[in-house]
RNA sequence: GUGGUUGUAGCUCAACCGGAUAGAGCACCUGGCUGUGGCCCAGGUUGUUGCGGGUUCGACUCCCGUCAACCACC
């Protein structure tokens, strides 16, 4: 059974609307995944996620491995049951932590896997491709991804090349282990497995990586190794380059992208799924997304501002809380401040993706994009 | 009333034997953050060194006076 079905295509761009069928649910793409590293979108209750209309989020294998740990997850029968959430769960493999926590990898990375020093207590732990698949099976996510090696930017060609070779090698082992485990399940309860493409900013490496990964064959393809500090032009160059070689009939996931401008761009290039920490992390630090651009609610100019966060938003925060009040909560260190902006920003992203889906269905993706971004950069009403 | 201690940025404190543009943390004001530790990073504003005299080439620093806070004793 095909897990992905395209139901609409934009005529002038590569944007498309699809249905992704997972064992939990069928959900519509383009899809934005808020990040729930430890199984929770920081500060938000599951009831709130449901109310906002969050269909799916992404959790992290590495972090869940340390807390709550395999045993608790096994006891409860996976993350869905542990957190009582019937939406779709993606899991990241820990490959990104090879990059983000690289100072905790004293031995470096080899063919067998990665030896991590726990960021919590410094103890040594070993992740192999097989282990990561097992863990994601224990977590019982709907969509798992292969272990990959994400390298920093900028990176030397030779190092990027080795990471591509390693990522391919690991992808094969992930796929083998995955098939072995999935044999025990009936077809309705199959997890999906996505492969990850590396290659940094080198086009020949990107092409090699995606050919290798597509040859192995996965339920979807993720573009990794971007959003690691490279300039926006390179992000755009790589995403548009890779997208032209990806199979059309499989979901395409660009990992770590979530700035408003980048989101429109990646959808335009034919990507279906993206995830990003920005709406929540920046929300916790005072940045709010509004129809008229980003604002930092901590700025003193909002101290007496009676206007709502985003005059065009209909979330409860924008109905009931003035900018001045949220400013006050932030300056006072009140926890509610973090929640209000997290809620609003996630709401903003969900509404944005609904708008994107709708514009593709109605055949006006490009003009919608232009209109949206023009307003977003106008800084009116701010 | 007498004796003592202390007064330096909004706050807590540095500043050698008298030496150059009086510094730091926090706070405040901005900016940054792209497969998450609420963190962190990068900049920026702020001083009549309680006040007034004096000595000196030069005073936060030494001297005199004065004000304030605190402590002890009457």
Image: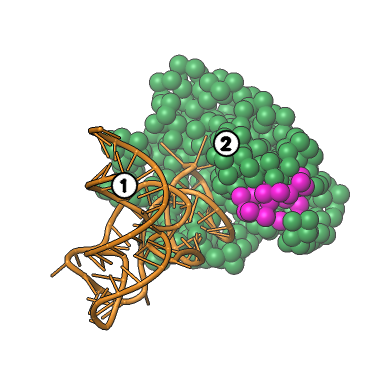
N-terminal label among 2 and 1: 1
Tell me which residue sits at (44%, 35%) in the image. Answer: A63
Along the line of sight, which residue is nearer the eye, A66 or A316?
A: A316
Q: Is residue A107 above or below residue A158?
A: above
In the rendered picture of this protein, how many numbered marks are placed on residues? Answer: 2
Residue B34 location in percent, x, y?
A: 54, 51
Residue A344 location in percent, x, y?
A: 69, 41
Residue A292, by quadrant, is bottom right
Q: Which region is colored magenta?
A: A288-308
Badge 2: few (under 14), some or many (20 or more) residues near its Cα, within 10 Å? few
Q: Name the residue under label 1.
A: A105
Q: In the figure, is residue A189 to the left or right of A52? A: left
Residue B24, by quadrant, is bottom left
Residue B28 location in percent, x, y?
A: 55, 53
Please give the label number shown on residue A14. none
Q: Does A307 appear in magenta?
A: yes
Q: Name the residue under label 2.
A: A334
Tell me whether marks 2 and 1 sit on the same chain. yes
Q: Does A181 appear in magenta?
A: no
Badge 1: few (under 14), some or many (20 or more) residues near its Cα, within 10 Å? some
The chain holding disc 1 is A
């Amino acid at each position: 059974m095909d897990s992905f079905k395209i139901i609409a295509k934009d005529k002038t761009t590569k944007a498309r609307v699809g249905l992704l069928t997972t064992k939990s649910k069928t959900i519509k793409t383009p899809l934005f995944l808020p990040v729930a590293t430890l199984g929770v979108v920081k500060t938000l209750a599951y009831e709130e996620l449901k109310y906002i209309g969050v269909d799916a989020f992404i959790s992290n294998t590495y972090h869940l491995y340390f807390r709550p740990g395999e045993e608790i997850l096994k006891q409860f029968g996976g993350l869905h049951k542990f957190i009582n959430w019937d939406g779709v769960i993606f899991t990241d493999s820990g490959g990104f932590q090879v990059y983000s926590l690289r100072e905790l990898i004293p031995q470096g990375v080899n063919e067998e896997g990665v030896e991590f020093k726990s960021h919590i207590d410094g103890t040594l732990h070993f992740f192999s491709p097989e282990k990561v698949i097992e863990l994601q099976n224990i977590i019982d996510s709907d969509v798992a991804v292969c272990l990959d090696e994400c390298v920093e930017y900028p990176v030397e060609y030779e190092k990027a090349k080795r990471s591509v070779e390693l990522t391919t090698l690991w992808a094969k082992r992930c796929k083998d282990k995955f098939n072995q485990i999935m044999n025990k399940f009936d077809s309705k309860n199959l997890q999906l497995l996505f492969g990850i493409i590396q290659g940094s900013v080198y086009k020949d490496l990107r092409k090699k990586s995606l050919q290798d990964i597509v040859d192995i064959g996965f339920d979807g393809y993720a573009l990794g190794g971007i959003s690691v500090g490279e300039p926006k032009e390179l992000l755009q160059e790589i995403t548009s380059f890779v997208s032209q070689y990806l199979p059309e009939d499989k979901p395409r996931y660009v990992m770590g992208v979530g700035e408003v401008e980048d989101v429109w761009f990646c959808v335009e290039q034919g990507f279906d799924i993206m995830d990003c920490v920005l709406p929540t992390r920046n929300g916790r630090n005072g940045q709010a997304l509004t129809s008229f651009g980003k604002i930092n609610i901590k700025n003193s100019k909002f101290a007496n501002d009676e206007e709502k966060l985003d005059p065009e938003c209909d979330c409860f925060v924008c109905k009931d809380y003035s900018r001045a009040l949220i400013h006050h909560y932030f300056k006072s260190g009140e926890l509610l401040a973090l929640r209000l902006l997290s809620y609003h920003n996630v709401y903003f992203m969900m509404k944005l993706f609904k708008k994107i889906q709708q514009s593709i269905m109605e055949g006006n993706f490009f003009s919608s994009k232009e209109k949206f971004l023009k307003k977003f950069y106008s800084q009116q009403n701010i």
